[in-house]
């Protein structure tokens, strides 16, 4: 049935084509006309022409109204110009607001403007008089000569000059008569242009470069859309003839339009954000294309509206997919903002928490960040996947530590990695302190010095909630992660966390509070939203709850990644699925770059032990602070402060054993155990002598 039906529908077309083909190709007018008449676009053209014809009287009236209104506007402008209307209104406003200084300035400006205007007029008049005074007598003499003498009797040059003047006069007359004909037409066109509708729909004529000419956003549209949200104070404001104040008028911002509005009394930005659906519908946009958020104050609305369909396209390839290496200090290309700009995501001095519902692109985003890090030959990678997932397998050869799985051994390895990061932080702190000028943080220059071990260290934990909720290791992991996040920043140590479950039970509060970059793919509720992006973000309209599962896969709301309050980012995707693996080639390239630079894969665990082995004797000497006798209790406290990772858990017996290795021990003095400075220095000189 269906097949027959489809065939039937096609028949007329086939028939037409046959007839046309059978016509002799002889330039027969009727056949050409017929062909044109039946051409696919012609029907549409005919319909448009007929429609415009029907609308002709209305269009004519409208045009007449434009001309009339144009004159009105000109008159208003002329009046404003002549009476300094704009400056006077400034002065009036200043008087109303009691700003005496502004009022004085405006009045001075009026006076200065008036003076300048009369001055200009005087100059023009003066020039006219001077020109007339020169030209008029010469003209009069020439006219008299031309009237009394024949050209043949004149000097030839005078006759030529008079001919020339005659020709110029004729040309002037012709041009003037043409202008008299064209002038009024031009005048009417200009008046119609001036009086044109400045509402959207007509103004597209002035902005032909815009793709979305039929749907662009301006203040009037925004006001209209806001006036139809059903917010009582806003409605009352508009009903009383109020006009919204646009602190930033509609302006092009990336692939969309941005406006900033001061809302009237009784209305806050979050009231508007709560009605985002309606606002989007009123503006003729999809919800995801409409972003009302709180500005600097609760009563200031920042509204960004994407061009129609601008967010639908893909991001294209990851910029480093096929070529190039990277400096993590410059950031990693992560995605495209709603404004269509590439986001260079910060890694150094940053920590990331990436979350969202399953299958929305968390692991892919984490992979992109790690791929970027891998392409920096100085960066060291540690990767822990707290679940059975091959998502990060390709990184195996490039990562110094890579563990994946559900079992306790992986959790234990992750905790011990966090312990090591904590120790490494202390070591790096010490190394930094020993550098000339005691730099406050690791710089590219310091990271490049091979002996120091201050290179970037990026540790990623996927499905981190599994670790933080682990019955045995969870508490310690949380403690350590918070420490690394708070203090690793300065030392080039970066923690990247990804999770499906960003609640307060699964991710420690201190982690969510302290990470600098929060990324939320589609999330289910306000709790998850604020868990990833920060408290109060949902209320402020920054909502990943509006991202749709599947449809908006790969799109996330990010806070802290750029300087903007938030960004809607379409993350780059480096495919890693059943049959396509574009991650491995990048990792292989990263390994080749390492070889090219003659570097090995860094391992800070080893470096820590090799670079600066802990030396208790030197440390004890350091904490004596030049005193002759220091109680062991004080020595232990100072040691713990000096290097907490090493000495925090030391007891009296640890200290005693360490000193015994150098042939001395604590002594009793005044009833307490003390360490004597002379014993320490004797042991040091003995050891140094032996060395
Ligand atoms: N940026 C992106 N652009 C396009 N598609 C993407 C993007 N990120 C992920 N995807 C698609 O989504 C799928 C799931 O991605 P991914 O494994 O990163 O999700 P996830 O959030 O980590 O899931 P899970 O929580 O189950 O680990 C990918 O296989 C890919 O097809």
Image: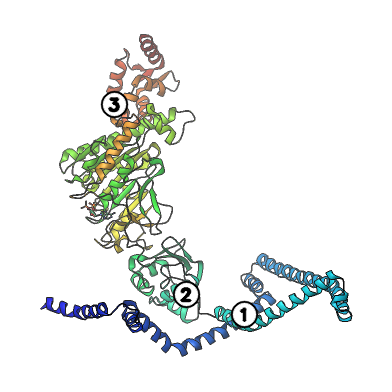
Say if mark 2 contacts mark 1, CB within 8 Å.
no
Q: Quadrant of residue 612?
A: top left
Q: Nearer the viewer, mark 3 or mark 1?
A: 1
Q: Earlier in the sequence, mark 3 or mark 1?
A: 1
* Residue 389 horizontal/vertical position (percent): 18, 46
- Find residue 651 and name its label: 3
- Name the element at disc 3: loop
With respect to residue 126, does 177 lie above or below? Answer: below
Q: Does residue 123 appear in this view?
A: yes
Real-space CA distance between mark 3 and mark 1, rounded to the nearest whole angstrom: 91 Å
Count every numbered label the image shows and give the total: 3
The image quadrant where one finds the N terminus is bottom left
* Residue 601 horizontal/vertical position (percent): 29, 32
Instruction: Give neighbour class at mark 2: few <14, some 14-19, many 20+ (Cα, 10 Å).
Output: some
Say if mark 2 contacts mark 3, CB within 8 Å.
no
- Name the element at disc 2: helix
Instruction: Give neighbour class at mark 1: few <14, some 14-19, many 20+ (Cα, 10 Å).
Output: some
* Residue holding disc 1: 74
- Residue at (69% x, 65% y) in the render: 105
């Amino acid at each position: 049935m269906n097949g027959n039906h489809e065939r039937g529908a096609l028949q007329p077309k086939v028939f037409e084509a046959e007839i046309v083909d059978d016509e002799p190709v002889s330039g027969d007018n009727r056949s050409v006309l017929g062909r044109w008449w039946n051409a696919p676009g012609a029907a549409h053209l005919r319909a448009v022409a007929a429609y415009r014809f029907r609308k002709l009287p209305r269009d004519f009236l409208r045009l007449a109204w434009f001309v009339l209104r144009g004159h009105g506007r000109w008159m208003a402008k002329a009046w404003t110009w002549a009476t300094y209307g704009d400056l006077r209104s400034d002065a009036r406003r200043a008087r109303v607001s009691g700003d005496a200084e502004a009022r004085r300035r405006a009045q001075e400006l009026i006076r200065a403007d008036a003076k300048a205007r009369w001055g200009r007029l005087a100059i023009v008049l003066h020039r006219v008089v001077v020109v007339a005074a020169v030209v008029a007598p010469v003209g009069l003499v020439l006219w008299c000569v031309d009237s009394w003498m024949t050209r043949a009797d004149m000097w030839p040059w005078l006759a030529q000059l008079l001919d020339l003047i005659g020709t110029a006069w004729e040309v002037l007359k012709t041009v003037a008569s043409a202008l008299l004909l064209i002038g009024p037409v031009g005048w009417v066109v200009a008046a119609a242009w001036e009086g044109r509708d400045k509402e959207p729909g007509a103004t597209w004529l002035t902005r032909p470069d815009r793709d979305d000419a039929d749907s662009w956003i301006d203040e009037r549209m925004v006001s209209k859309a806001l006036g139809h949200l059903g917010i009582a104070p806003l409605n009352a404001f508009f009903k009383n003839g109020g006009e919204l104040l646009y602190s930033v008028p509609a302006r092009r911002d990336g692939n969309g339009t941005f406006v900033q509005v001061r809302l009237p009394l009784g209305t806050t930005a979050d009231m508007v954000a709560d009605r985002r659906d309606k606002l989007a519908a009123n503006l003729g946009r999809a919800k995801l294309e409409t972003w009302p958020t709180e500005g600097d104050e609760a009563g200031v609305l920042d509204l960004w509206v994407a061009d129609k369909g601008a967010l639908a396209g893909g991001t294209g390839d990851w910029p480093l997919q096929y070529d190039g290496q990277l400096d993590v200090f410059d950031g990693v290309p992560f995605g495209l903002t709603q404004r269509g700009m590439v986001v260079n995501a910060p890694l150094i001095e940053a920590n990331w928490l990436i979350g969202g519902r399953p299958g929305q692109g968390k692991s892919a985003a984490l992979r992109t960040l790690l791929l970027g890090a891998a392409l920096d030959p100085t960066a060291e990678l540690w990767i822990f996947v707290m679940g059975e997932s091959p998502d990060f397998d390709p990184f195996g050869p490039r990562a110094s530590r890579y563990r994946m799985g559900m079992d306790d051994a992986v959790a234990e390895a992750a905790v011990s990695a966090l312990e090591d990061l904590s120790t490494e932080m202390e070591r790096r702190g010490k190394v930094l302190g020993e550098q000339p000028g005691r730099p406050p943080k690791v710089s590219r220059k310091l990271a490049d010095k091979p002996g120091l071990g201050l290179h970037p260290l990026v540790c990623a934990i996927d499905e981190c909630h599994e670790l933080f909720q682990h019955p045995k290791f969870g508490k310690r992991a949380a403690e350590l992660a918070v420490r690394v996040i708070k203090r690793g920043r300065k030392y080039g140590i970066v923690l990247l966390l990804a999770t499906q479950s960003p609640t307060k039970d699964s991710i420690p509060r201190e982690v969510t509070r302290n990470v600098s970059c929060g990324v939320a793919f589609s999330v289910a509720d306000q709790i998850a939203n604020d868990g990833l992006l920060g408290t109060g973000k949902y209320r402020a309209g920054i909502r990943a709850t509006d991202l749709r599962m599947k449809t908006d896969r790969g799109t996330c709301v990010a806070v802290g990644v750029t300087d903007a309050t938030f960004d809607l980012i379409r993350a780059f995707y480096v495919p890693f699925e059943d049959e396509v693996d574009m991650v491995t080639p990048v990792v292989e390239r990263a390994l080749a770059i390492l070889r090219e630079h003659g570097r090995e894969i860094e391992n800070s665990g080893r470096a820590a032990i090799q670079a600066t082995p802990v030396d208790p004797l030197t440390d004890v000497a350091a904490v004596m602070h030049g005193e002759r006798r220091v109680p062991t209790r004080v020595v232990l406290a100072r040691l713990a402060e000096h290097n907490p990772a090493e000495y925090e858990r030391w007891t009296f017996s640890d200290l005693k054993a360490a000193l015994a290795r150098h042939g001395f021990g604590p002594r009793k003095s005044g009833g307490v155990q003390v360490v004597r400075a002379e014993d320490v220095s004797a042991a040091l000189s003995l050891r140094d002598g032996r060395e």
